[in-house]
Amino acid sequence: MSESTVAPLPHVAIQVFSETNQIMAVVEEASHDRRMVKAHLRIQAGGVAAAVEAYRDAPTPNVIVIETATDSRVLLDALDELASYCDEGTRVVVIGHVNDVHLYRELMRRGVSEYLVAPINVLGFIQALSEIFSNPTAKPVGRTIAVVGAKGGVGASTLAHNLAHTISQDLQVETVVVDLDLPFGTAGLDFNQDPPQGIMEAAFDPARVDPNMIERLLSRCAPHLNLMAAPSSLERIYDFAAETFEPVSDALRATVPAIVLDVPHMWTGWTRNVLVRADEVVVVASPDLANLRNAKNLIDTLTLARPNDPRPRLVLNQTGMPKRPEISVAEFAKALDCDPLAVIAFDATLFGTANNNGQMLSEVQPKSKAQEAVLDMAKALMGRQETKAGKKSLISTLREKLGNKSGKTKAA
């Protein structure tokens, strides 16, 4: 099971009744996973009998999870009694220790949402809960890739924008790049666009965030590529609550296969939340001591905060700069205990030309080693299955419908 295929849970209350230390440990670990951040989860010792007793005179939560090692007949009788106390809409998940198809059928007939057979793992448990609230006809959620610099000026934004462009053009996957550097964002310049301040409107009006609003706030940069731009203005102070950008991220994940987040080099509640919630995190660093320290802090901190996700990836950028003393790639990787996802050499002419002309690396020099490295990054971060051509998003479908209504030619 891929970590990125497990969708986050909504704001729900979950009560777990566990009979064994093994299941209790799994549930406790799951409670700290990023996908459970919105859920309110409580754990209590005892099985189905404890659940029946707990809800005789108390309202039931959204989900009741019951671990049981009792006889099947005893379990079914207790569940029938529990059903008489459950509020409408309460879901029940049973964790058993017997792989019994007849028991499974009886549980499903009684309206139990899921039957899991122990032993279970953290992601399997979270996925079982997540699927209860998922629309079975919905498309798989998109993959979010957060790119952040270990230090200012290391080229993280440039790589984020080129990564998004490469995913959309070379892998032919519908992609949105989100510029979260609100006061100083450069995505509009890099794509030679003058877009609306998309991300801010969504941030200030989260209740109205839906696919139609997202569509209105995007700017088309290239076939299969849209931009949600930052204001790049100092007219206001950009202090936000940690969860400010969650509605935007959730709406994009529900409609777009690939989302690249250009995260500024700062450490606030909302930037930490964006990084923790992403499916993949890319830390871009240059080969000097300050970058080494910052990259290690970022990777170690995010690894602890995302115990069931891939470790943040390291990209070493601007290597081989003339006359600059550098830490070798081998020493840098050894200190961080990770192999770099990519090592990109300093090339002032290529990157400078692209930035000044509002172009991507592939548009200036498509066969360059830097562009080859970005393409390898795109394939690794998206997975080989994502390289199939023509993967559309709900956003592109909406555009086609609008195009049909206005008599315009469909977008490529």
Image (spheres, rainbow, N blue to C red):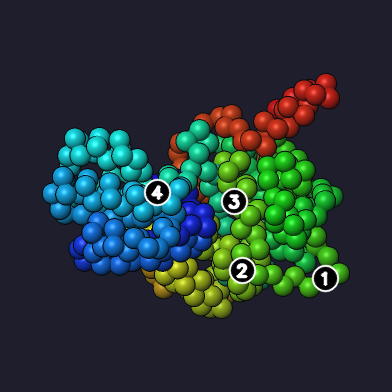
Question: Looking at the picture, which amino acid does disc 2 mark?
Answer: Ala
Disc 4, SS: strand
Q: Which residue is mark 3?
A: 250
- Residue at 37% of width from left, 63% of height from top? 57
Q: Check the image and name the residue furthest to the left.
A: 71
User: Of callouts 3 and 2, which one flags the residue occurring earlier in the amino acid sequence?
Assistant: 2
| Circle 3 residues within 10 Å: few <14, some 14–19, many ≥20 | some
User: Of callouts 2 and 4, which one flags the residue occurring earlier in the amino acid sequence?
Assistant: 4
Question: Looking at the picture, which amino acid does disc 3 mark?
Answer: Asp
User: Of callouts 4 and 3, which one flags the residue occurring earlier in the amino acid sequence?
Assistant: 4
Q: Which residue is mark 4?
A: 91
Q: State the image coordinates of residue 405 (x, y, percent, origin top left).
A: 80, 24
Is 283 positioned to the left or the right of 239 in the image?
A: left
Q: Which residue is mark 2?
A: 242
For the N terminus, which image quadrant? top left
Q: State the image coordinates of residue 107 (x, y, percent, origin top left).
A: 27, 40
Measure how far apart labels 2 and 4 are at the Cα level.
30 Å
Question: Looking at the picture, which amino acid does disc 1 mark?
Answer: Arg
Measure how far apart labels 4 and 1 are at the Cα level.
45 Å
Residue 309 in sight in this render: no
Q: Which residue is mark 1?
A: 236
- Contact check, label 3 and label 2, Cβ < 8 Å: no
